[in-house]
Image: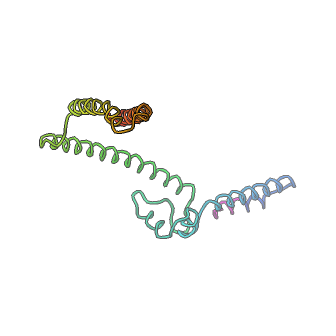
Amino acid sequence: MTRSDANYLTELLASAESPEDLQAVEELLAEQERAERTRDKWVCRTLAEVAEFFGLAVQTVKQWRIESPPMPGADGKYPLREIVQWRLNKLAGSSVLDAKRQADLESIKLVNEKRAMENAQKRGLLIEREEVERDMALLWSRLAARLTGVADRVTTLVPADLKATTKDRVEQEIRIIQKEFVDSLGDLI
């Protein structure tokens, strides 16, 4: 309460002529006291109290005082509501800047990757996808042709009574190998 507020209330008290006037002045005084307690509840007196409120080191809060714009408040009176709003504004502004910086960095990375790929292609270090797919198809057809004859070649090495069982077993293993190979090619392409 300021000195003029106190003087005004004292004058009102002195001019009270009835119990109702006195009651009204007392209510004004009580209201004034509640307002002061509420106002002081959200005002810190020291930078250490501000730091404690935010769970930070005092040095961090001192740094806030010299930032642009500086943290609101003055020695002995640091309004927490204003400081919280100031901090939110700073964080919101910095996240926008961070997002722009991140986008700029991503753009630079993409340009650099494109240049690296162009240089690798000029040096013959990159192969076109169609060329790789064509070579893989040729390799697969050669491998499949070789695998189909394996069962017949293996059965010539076993006794006659085991030939049918051995041939079935080898062909089953070859089908498993072919399926695994096809599946792994699908993952690559």
Q: Is residue 54 left or right of residue 123?
A: right
Check the image and report above or below for 53 versus 166. Answer: below
In the rendered image, the residue lying farthest to the front is: 160
**Spot occupied by residue 107 in the image (x, y as percentages of width and height):** 28, 42
Residue depicted at x 38% and y 36%: 177
In the rendered image, the residue lying farthest to the left is: 123
Check the image and report above or below for 17 versus 148. Answer: below
Q: Depth check: give the residue in front, 149 or 25.
A: 149
Q: Is residue 6 magenta?
A: yes
Q: Depth check: give the residue in front, 35 or 147.
A: 147
Q: Depth check: give the residue in front, 5 or 122.
A: 122
Q: Is residue 53 left or right of residue 129?
A: right
Residue depicted at x 30% and y 45%: 104
Residue depicted at x 80% and y 58%: 26
Tell me the quarter of the image containing the N terminus.
Answer: bottom right
**Spot occupied by residue 122 in the image (x, y as percentages of width and height):** 12, 40
Range of the magenta residues?
1-8
Q: Is residue 51 left or right of residue 38?
A: left
Count of numbered labels shown in the rendering: 0
Tell me the quarter of the image containing the C terminus.
Answer: top left
